[in-house]
Image (cartoon, rainbow, N blue to C red):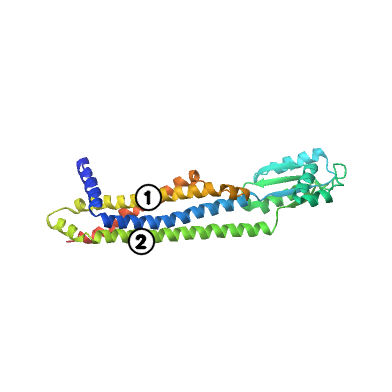
């Protein structure tokens, strides 16, 4: 295709969009509404997935050491645990720090109950907190850490805890939430595709007589088809671009206004910087593609004159 012909098709597509003002407005509005609903659920799904990931990353293994363990043995156990490929981070918590943390967690009651304990009669053991690369393998890692202690005849590890039972339930729930969110987003994407495609079909149907006349005067199929492709692409692009701008502006306001409340609960929403490219690209790409595809499928019927 020559460049001058392409320019002609672009000009005709844009002019056709302007000439059929109300029909174009209805098409753009339908696309904008359909994609806005999809975008809301897409952002919701991203935040749910982010929240479940935050919860999973907070899962830790606590390794309680023997009360009479030596410093050399403590360091040896730390090296053995840190050498496991599944371990991402290990932190030693001495018994004095553990006692202070317990006092803070118990509040006023903790100070009264634990006021007689100090470094000389501290009943708490030294511990290690262990974070794993893949939280869903936490039971496997806990078993390996327990095996490290069992292999030593002095039994330097008293117990290994990670919330057995509760953690497995947590992972089942988070996986179910992810799958449900994915199904909802895919379902809405399919519904939006049907709605937008039908809207484009109605636009082409309203101009079927114009297409028939162009065929009768000798215009080729490609000459007729290209302006409609471009018009469909413009309708899809404008509708999805308007949706993306409004949606991300509203979401950014929501994130900013809820930042303090969610921050107090240690919950972090996905920011526009993190989600904008994905959501905007998905909505604009889907809207433009459906606009072109809807025009292509709809106009084929009226080219057979």
Q: Position of residue 235 (x, y in %)?
A: 31, 52
Please report the residue visible at 36 percent of the width from the left and 53 percent of the height from the top. Answer: 287
Is the residue marked by circle 2 packed among few (<14), some (14-19), or many (20+) residues within 10 Å?
A: some
* Secondary structure of the residue carrying numbered label 2: helix
Gap between marks 1 and 2, in whole Å?
17 Å
Residue 126 in sight from this viewpoint: no
Query: What number is the disc on residue 274?
Result: none
Q: Quadrant of residue 6?
A: top left
Q: Label 1 belongs to which residue?
A: 242
Name the residue: 83% across, 43% down. Answer: 69
Q: Secondary structure at mark 1?
A: helix
- For label 1, the crowd category at 10 Å Cα-Cα, with few meaning under 14, some 14 to 19 and many 20 or more, is some
Residue 88, x across and y down, in percent: 64, 43
- 46 or 6, which lies in front? 46
Q: Is residue 268 left or right of residue 165?
A: left
Q: Residue at x 78, y 41 (%)?
A: 74
- Left or right: where does residue 290 sit relative to residue 105? left
Residues at badges 1 and 2 in contact (C-beta under 8 Å)? no
**Quadrant of the snapshot with the C terminus:** bottom left
Q: Earlier in the sequence, mark 1 or mark 2?
A: 2
Q: Quadrant of the N terminus?
A: top left
Left or right: 9 in relation to 32? left
Q: Residue furthest left?
A: 217
Image location (x, y in percent) of residue 57: 62, 49
Above-or-below relation of 163 to 148: below
Q: Is residue 178 left or right of residue 4?
A: right
Residue of label 2: 195
Say if residue 259 shows up in the picture: yes
Mark closer to the observer (1, 2)? 1
Give the percent coordinates (x, y) of residue 258: 55, 49
């Amino acid at each position: 295709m020559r460049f001058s012909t392409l320019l002609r098709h672009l000009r005709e597509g844009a002019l056709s969009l302007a000439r059929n003002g109300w029909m174009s407005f209805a098409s753009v509005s339908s696309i904008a509404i359909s994609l806005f609903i999809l975008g809301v659920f897409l952002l919701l799904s991203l935040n749910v997935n982010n929240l479940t990931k935050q919860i999973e990353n907070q899962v830790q293994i606590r390794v309680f050491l023997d009360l009479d363990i030596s410093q050399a043995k403590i360091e040896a156990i730390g090296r053995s645990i840190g050498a496991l490929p599944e371990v991402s981070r290990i932190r030693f918590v001495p018994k004095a720090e553990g006692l202070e943390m317990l006092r803070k967690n118990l509040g006023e009651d903790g100070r009264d109950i634990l006021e007689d304990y100090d470094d000389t009669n501290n009943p708490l053991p030294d511990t290690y907190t262990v974070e794993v690369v893949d939280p869903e393998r936490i039971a496997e890692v806990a078993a390996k850490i327990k095996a490290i202690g069992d292999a030593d005849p002095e039994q330097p590890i008293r117990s290994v805890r990670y919330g057995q039972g509760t953690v497995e339930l947590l992972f089942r729930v988070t996986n179910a939430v992810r799958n449900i969110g994915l199904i909802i987003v895919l379902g809405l994407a399919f519904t939006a595709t049907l709605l937008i495609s039908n809207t484009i079909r109605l636009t082409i149907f309203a101009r079927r007589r114009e297409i028939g006349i162009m065929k009768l005067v000798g215009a080729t199929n490609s000459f007729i088809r290209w302006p409609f492709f471009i018009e469909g692409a413009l309708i899809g692009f404008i509708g999805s671009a308007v949706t993306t701008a409004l949606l991300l502006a509203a979401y950014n306001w929501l994130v900013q206004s809820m930042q303090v409340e969610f921050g107090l609960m240690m919950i972090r929403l996905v920011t526009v910087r993190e989600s904008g490219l994905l959501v905007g690209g998905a909505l604009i790409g889907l809207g433009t593609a459906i606009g072109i595809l809807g025009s292509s499928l709809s106009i084929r019927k009226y080219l057979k004159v």
